Amino acid sequence: QVQLVESGGGLVQAGGSLRLSCAASGRTFSTLSMGWFRQAPGKEREFVAAIRWSGNRYYADSVKGRFTISRDNAKNTVYLQMNSLKPEDTAVYYCAAGSYSDYPAAYDHWGQGTQVTVSS
């Protein structure tokens, strides 16, 4: 079993930055692939970024060049650095652990989510 706890969300103006953190416990973190997803009101959960246990990473086209996913295996934590934020980035952001994929169904464990609101 894996427990995930996100933090770092908040309110920011367009063009600003936030860094989300996701602390993992319960299983050897270094063997896990991790992902970030987001869900806006009335919309389906969508892929944001993923990082393999080996460090390979990829991004949704909508965030490429603005967001960076990283991990610190010594701290059992994965991060999402978000720069040049836009109002359309407003959503609840979820951390997930599972297979290296952009499909939510590939992930077995989810955090509770953290709200990110970008004002125009």
Image (cartoon, grey):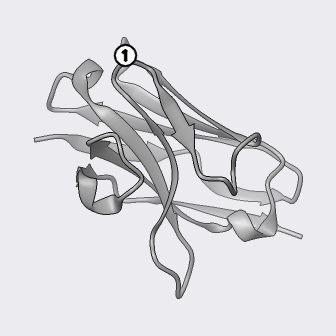
Position in image of residue 73 (x %, y %): 37, 16
Q: Residues within 10 Å of mark 1 (few under 14, many from 20)?
A: some
Kind of residue indicated by mark 1: Asn
36 relative to 101 in the view: left or right: right
Residue at 59% across / 52% down in the picture? 60
Name the side, left or right, on which 97 lies relative to 44: left
Which residue corresponds to the image point at 43% horizontal and 59% vertical from the top-left?
Answer: 113
Question: What residue is at 78 percent from the left and 42 percent from the top?
Answer: 83
| Rendered location of residue 102, percent (x, y) | 42, 53
Q: In this view, does 83 lie above or below 74?
A: below
Residue at 23% x, 50% y is 109
Determine which quarter of the picture holds residue 12. Answer: bottom right
Tell me the element at label 1. loop
Along the viewing direction, whichever of 107 and 2 lies nearer the viewer: 107
Could you tell me residue 24's position as x and y percent? 30, 34
- Mark count: 1
Relative to 112, is 36 on the left or the right? right
Which of the 4 image quadrants contains residue 59?
Answer: top right
